[in-house]
């Protein structure tokens, strides 16, 4: 049996070898010209000839990877890997403000000696003197203000599984020394693209707030959807910030709480993922929260083909 055969495409004879598809043969013999399609394949028709067969086989396109995933530590969800990590810098500072935001959330402000370049949604590694380092998300005050040399954090108060939040107001007081290294994390804001979906649970609102505020100034016409949740309705401390977003044109804001106790009429029940239906391939999702929240949203985004940038909030923060 011959290892070659021929077929006619657009009135021209095309030689086909064993293992070639008719499309590959037509491309190689210049009968049809390539145009870039999905997954790096080349489809279409045109007047310009394509490379000969040997060259076409050598440079045959591989499927495009939408994102790379790096293995995470045990118990963490997968996170997206960037091609170029952000350059890190170190700063020193002190705690200059500790103020309550809600029933179980406080605002901690660290004033550093010199400004640290961060994108909205970036995290930093903060080492409060006498405690282990933690990754936290700098944000803005609820009214949107901050100084260039301030780092504003939203932390849970007195959580037993985290020594720092348990020590706030007791061992950690105003003037407490803090070392900062950053930026860290890959969930930072990237202008451009489709609809922006911002999902945060409890103190995961901190990076979501900084991203949302930046997006309203940088891309005022971009559609934004915000979904914020908490276990207890009393921990939905971010209403002043959400009021600002509404005033600037963000109409789709959803508040969610697990517990029914003292749940206001505008707070819906159930998990955050129940309020993320209708995802599109053109959507860009930023999600900040605990491992289970981030993982569940990542699964939904992957199923829809949407880009997802996770921000993992360590336990107890």
Image: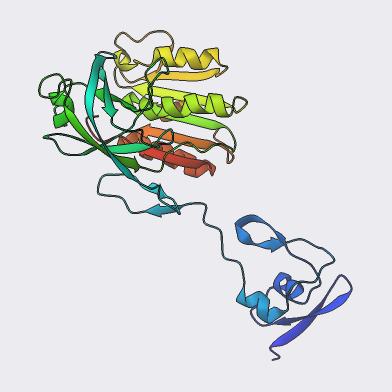
Does residue 172 sit above or below 48 in this rendering? Answer: above
Rendering coords of residue 63 (x, y %): 56, 61
- What is the total number of numbered labels drawn onto the structure image? 0
Asked whether residue 64 appears in the rendered view, the answer is yes
Quadrant in the picture for the C terminus: top left
Quadrant in the picture for the N terminus: bottom right
Residue projecting furthest to the right: 11
The residue shown at (16%, 29%) is 164
The residue shown at (20%, 39%) is 133
Type of colouring? rainbow
Q: Quadrant of residue 177?
A: top left
Residue projecting furthest to the bottom: 1
The residue shown at (41%, 23%) is 228
Whether residue 280 sits left or right of residue 269 in the image: it is: right
Q: Quadrant of residue 117?
A: top left
Does residue 70 sit above or below 153 in this rendering? Answer: below
Rendering coords of residue 239 (x, y %): 40, 13
Q: Quadrant of residue 170?
A: top left
Rendering coords of residue 231 (x, y %): 30, 21
Q: Nearer the viewer, residue 263 or 32?
A: 32
Asked whether residue 104 appears in the rendered view, the answer is no
Whether residue 215 sits left or right of residue 109 in the image: it is: right
Does residue 209 sit above or below 309 in this rendering? Answer: above
The residue shown at (42%, 8%) is 265
Whether residue 150 sits left or right of residue 189 in the image: it is: left
Q: Nearer the viewer, residue 232 or 197?
A: 197
Rendering coords of residue 111 (x, y %): 28, 26
């Amino acid at each position: 049996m011959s290892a070659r055969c021929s077929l006619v495409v657009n009135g021209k004879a095309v030689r086909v070898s064993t293992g070639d598809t008719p499309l590959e043969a037509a491309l190689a013999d210049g009968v049809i010209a390539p145009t870039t399609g999905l997954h790096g394949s080349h489809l279409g028709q045109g007047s310009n000839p394509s490379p000969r067969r040997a060259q076409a086989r050598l440079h045959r396109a591989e499927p495009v990877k939408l994102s790379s995933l790096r293995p995470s530590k045990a118990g963490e969800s997968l996170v997206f890997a960037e091609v170029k990590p952000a350059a890190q810098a170190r700063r020193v500072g002190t705690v200059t403000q500790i103020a309550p935001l809600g029933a179980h959330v406080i605002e901690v402000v660290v004033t550093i000696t010199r400004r640290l370049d961060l994108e909205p949604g970036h995290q930093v590694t903060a080492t409060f003197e006498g405690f282990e380092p933690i990754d936290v998300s700098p944000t803005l005050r609820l009214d949107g203000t901050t100084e260039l040399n301030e780092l504003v954090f939203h932390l849970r108060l007195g959580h037993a599984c985290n020594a720092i939040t348990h020590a706030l107001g007791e061992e950690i007081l105003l003037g407490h020394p803090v070392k900062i290294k950053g930026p860290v994390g890959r969930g930072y804001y990237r202008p451009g693209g489709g609809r922006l979906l911002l999902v945060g649970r409890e103190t995961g609102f901190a990076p979501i707030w900084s991203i949302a505020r930046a997006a309203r100034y940088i891309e005022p016409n971009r559609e934004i959807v915000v979904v914020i949740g908490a276990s207890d309705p009393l921990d939905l401390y971010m209403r002043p910030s959400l009021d600002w977003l509404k005033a600037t044109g963000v109409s789709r804001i959803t508040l969610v709480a697990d517990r029914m106790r003292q749940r206001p009429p505008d707070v819906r029940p159930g998990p955050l993922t129940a309020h993320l239906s209708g995802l599109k391939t053109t959507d860009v999702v930023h999600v900040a929260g605990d491992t289970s929240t981030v993982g569940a949203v990542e699964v939904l985004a992957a199923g829809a083909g949407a880009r997802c940038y996770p921000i993992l909030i360590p336990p107890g923060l």
